[in-house]
Amino acid sequence: DSGPDKVLQSMNVLVSHTIPAKAPRDIYDAFFATGDDANAESGYEKALKSAGKKDIKVGGWEFSKKGFVDEWCKESFPQRRTLTYTFERTASLSSGPSTVAVKLTQYCRIEGETRLVTQAYIETMGRPVSDAFRIATRSVTTHAGSDEMLMKAGIFVVFLKKTPFESKI
């Protein structure tokens, strides 16, 4: 463990949970990898399905030795992918079509045997003011014992431009 994650500390942490696993790679393999079979579902895709998401498309991971630099936190990640899906809006999203299309750009970095960091941006497509913000999510998984990993996940609204609805988002 290389200390607290400064980016995660700046977010609203929503999850802090131990997971039975020995190494960050175990979590990656179970939740983010898609395997050798192009038709194999990742754990992430299964989680989206179980949450009622539809029309799920998971792009393959892109890899870069230079890394993909995240615009918001300025960190470099060696891999990224794009996912898209739809869901039925809730009553709190009162305007626009009943189906919401989402684009999720996900970044991932495994730091040796100590840490797995994922960061993602959730963008809604074709919604009122959807071009004014995006939702940043981040999870950091570290050792919590010999057979456990501690996953902490947070969320932050990244405003891309001023909107009169800022206080409502």
Image (cartoon, rainbow, N blue to C red):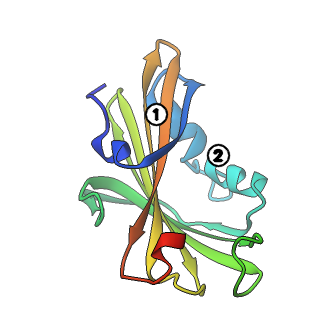
Q: As displayed, is residue 62 above or below residue 15?
A: below
Q: Is residue 33 left or right of residue 109?
A: right
Q: As displayed, is residue 151 above or below residue 105?
A: above
Tell me, yes or no, if residue 169 can be seen here: no
Write the residue at 59% across / 87% down: 126
Write the residue at 31% across / 53% down: 77
Amino acid type at image mark 2: Gly
Quadrant position of residue 57: bottom right
Image coords of residue 74 (percent x, y): 23, 59
* Residue in the foreground of this view, choosing between 9 and 169: 169
Q: Earlier in the sequence, mark 1 or mark 2?
A: 1
| Residue at the limit of the structure toward the top, as seen here | 146
> Which residue position holds label 2?
43
* Residue in the foreground of this view, choosing between 14 and 103: 14
* Residue in the foreground of this view, choosing between 135 and 37: 135
> Which residue position holds label 1?
25
In 3D space, how far apart are the residues under numbered discs 1 and 2 (Cα atoms)? 14 Å
* Residue in the foreground of this view, choosing between 32 and 37: 32
Write the residue at 36% across / 81% down: 161
Amino acid type at image mark 1: Arg
Image coords of residue 58 (percent x, y): 59, 64
- Element under label 2? helix
Write the residue at 36% across / 27% down: 113
